[in-house]
């Protein structure tokens, strides 16, 4: 399973027909690994999840490769829990997370009973809840700070094949977007490489801060620095304002949580200076023009306000069942996190999600403040800063539908829950 990223990347570069064969073989071999070595399976998922995005357009029996993965991993984890019956009741957040996931599926079932679209509902519910399975898996296998560090290392390694594909095909498949060359690589939209670059950068920052590279040779340090530049360039050329803003906000939150006020001020000055660079202004010219009062706000984020208006009008004329139970993916993507939750899950599901998110943030803050181990404290605040930073992307995106981001954050949250528990356990 650990070689899947390299294998799929190599086949994707040649666009060979063996891609779905390799992907399905890895999935079939990886699921039993959950039973034999759940810790190795978690690391394998972290390493290969991004790579499967390269095979998104390949189908087997009418289903996409990602359909098998996104459904197979949560089901595999469920089988693991049923067969091994680990003692997880003491894990913090487990009950509210499981209760929320159960509520989503109850609402899905009620929606289907009223005649909802089966495929759209299942796909939507899987996107919402599949990450919670990674929370359980991480809480089950992470027992010490080294395990959390390994998880971050494997997330960073998982960015390698995606960056390889992005830059190998991007230049030759560039499309003009309002005078700006936008790299689309093998994707119809650059959202996936933007998410990968963002998560990779945040993981790299954690690894530097935790001192992971302290004893490395200067050659490896240089290589590591070059890779951060590669990820930064990939994030910039995806033209994703939401991911760029989320990443910057998360980095600022890390400095705020550490009370590095001079660095916060310096970062704000640097960000202000970067916005004055002509190339940067060209890339986000519309938003800058809106901020300066030189453009219609309706054109913000590629015209998303107009999209929100159309969705709200549709909601006004929707039947009562849709307003109460949600539409579960049948209306498509509103490109706004709050609207996504409200429309798809209805007021009950959206309200429960808000309560869960607040519960998670409060728990992370408490664990961070109570933690006495510096490396674990750092892990808590990096995860907290990343989670808070990604709230920014709710404005123009739907992060609950981004499986890569879901799996990353839920894995890290599960690790945080487990590490907070070990801090309270008496020493042997």
Image (cartoon, grey):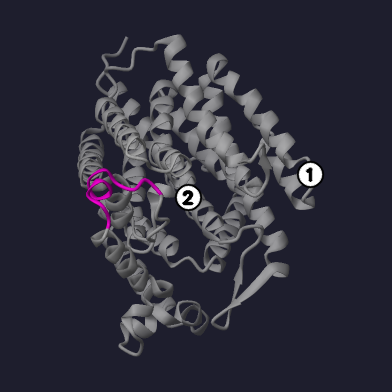
Q: Indicate left or right for 343 with 56 as reference.
A: left
Q: Secondary structure at mark 1?
A: loop
Quadrant of the snapshot with the C terminus: top left
The Cα–Cα distance between marks 2 and 1, rounded to whole angstroms, is 30 Å
Q: Earlier in the sequence, mark 2 or mark 1?
A: 1
Residue 178 appears at what percent x and percent y? 54, 82
Q: From this viewpoint, is residue 215 visible?
A: no
Q: Closest to the observer: 213 or 292?
A: 292
Residue drawn at x 32%, y 66% is: 308
Eyeballing the image, is 296 above or below 41?
Answer: below
Numbered range of the magenta stretch: 318-329
Residue 249 among those drawn in magenta: no
Which circle, 2 or 1, is nearer the viewer? 1
Number of residues whose C-alpha sits closer than 10 Å to that of mark 2, classed few (under 14), some (14–19) or many (20 or more): many
Residue drawn at x 57%, y 62% is: 234
Q: Indicate left or right for 122 with 11 as reference.
A: left
Residue 372 appears at what percent x and percent y? 26, 32
- Label 2 belongs to which residue? 199
Residue 248 appears at what percent x and percent y? 39, 61
- Label 1 belongs to which residue? 17
Residue drawn at x 34%, y 48% is: 327
Q: From this viewpoint, is residue 315 visible?
A: yes
Quadrant of the snapshot with the N terminus: top right
Eyeballing the image, is 303 above or below 290?
Answer: above
Residue drawn at x 55%, y 18% is: 37
């Amino acid at each position: 399973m650990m070689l899947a990223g390299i294998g799929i990347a190599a086949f994707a570069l040649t666009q060979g027909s063996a891609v779905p064969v390799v992907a399905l073989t890895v999935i079939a071999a990886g699921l039993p690994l959950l039973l034999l070595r759940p810790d190795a399976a978690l690391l394998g998922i972290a390493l290969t999840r991004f790579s499967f995005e390269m095979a998104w357009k390949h189908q087997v029996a009418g289903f996409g490769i990602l359909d098998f993965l996104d459904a197979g991993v949560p089901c595999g984890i469920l089988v693991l829990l049923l067969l091994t019956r680990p003692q997880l009741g003491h894990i913090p957040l487990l009950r509210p997370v499981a209760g929320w996931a159960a509520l989503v599926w109850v609402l899905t079932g009620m929606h289907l009973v009223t005649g909802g679209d089966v495929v759209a509902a299942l796909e939507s519910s899987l996107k919402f809840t599949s990450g919670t399975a990674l929370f359980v898996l991480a809480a089950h296998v992470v027992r010490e700070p080294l395990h959390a560090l390994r998880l971050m290392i494997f997330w960073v390694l998982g960015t390698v094949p995606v960056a390889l594909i992005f830059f190998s095909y991007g230049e030759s498949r560039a499309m003009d977007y309002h005078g700006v060359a936008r790299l689309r690589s093998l994707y119809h939209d650059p959202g996936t490489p933007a998410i990968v670059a963002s998560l990779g950068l945040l993981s790299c920052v954690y690894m530097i801060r935790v001192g992971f590279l302290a004893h490395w040779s200067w050659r490896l340090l240089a290589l590591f620095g070059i890779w951060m530049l590669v990820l930064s360039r990939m994030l910039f050329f995806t033209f994703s304002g939401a991911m760029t803003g989320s990443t910057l906000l998360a980095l600022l939150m890390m400095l705020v949580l550490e009370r590095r006020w001079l660095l916060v001020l310096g970062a704000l000055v640097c960000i202000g200076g970067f916005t004055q660079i002509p190339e940067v202004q060209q890339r986000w010219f519309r938003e800058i023009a809106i901020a300066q009062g030189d453009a219609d706000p309706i054109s913000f984020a590629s015209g998303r306000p107009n999209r929100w208006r159309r969705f709200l009008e549709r909601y006004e004329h929707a039947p009562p069942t849709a307003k109460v139970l949600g539409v579960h993916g049948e209306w498509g993507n509103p490109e706004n996190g709050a609207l996504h939750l409200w429309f798809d899950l209805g007021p009950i599901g959206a309200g429960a999600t808000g309560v869960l998110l607040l519960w998670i943030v409060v728990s992370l803050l408490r664990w961070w403040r109570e933690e006495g181990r510096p490396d674990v404290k750092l892990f808590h605040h990096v995860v907290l800063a990343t989670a808070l930073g990604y709230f920014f992307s709710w404005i123009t995106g739907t992060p609950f539908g981004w499986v890569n981001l879901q799996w990353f954050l839920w894995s890290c949250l599960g690790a945080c829950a487990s590490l907070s528990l070990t801090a309270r356990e008496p020493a042997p």
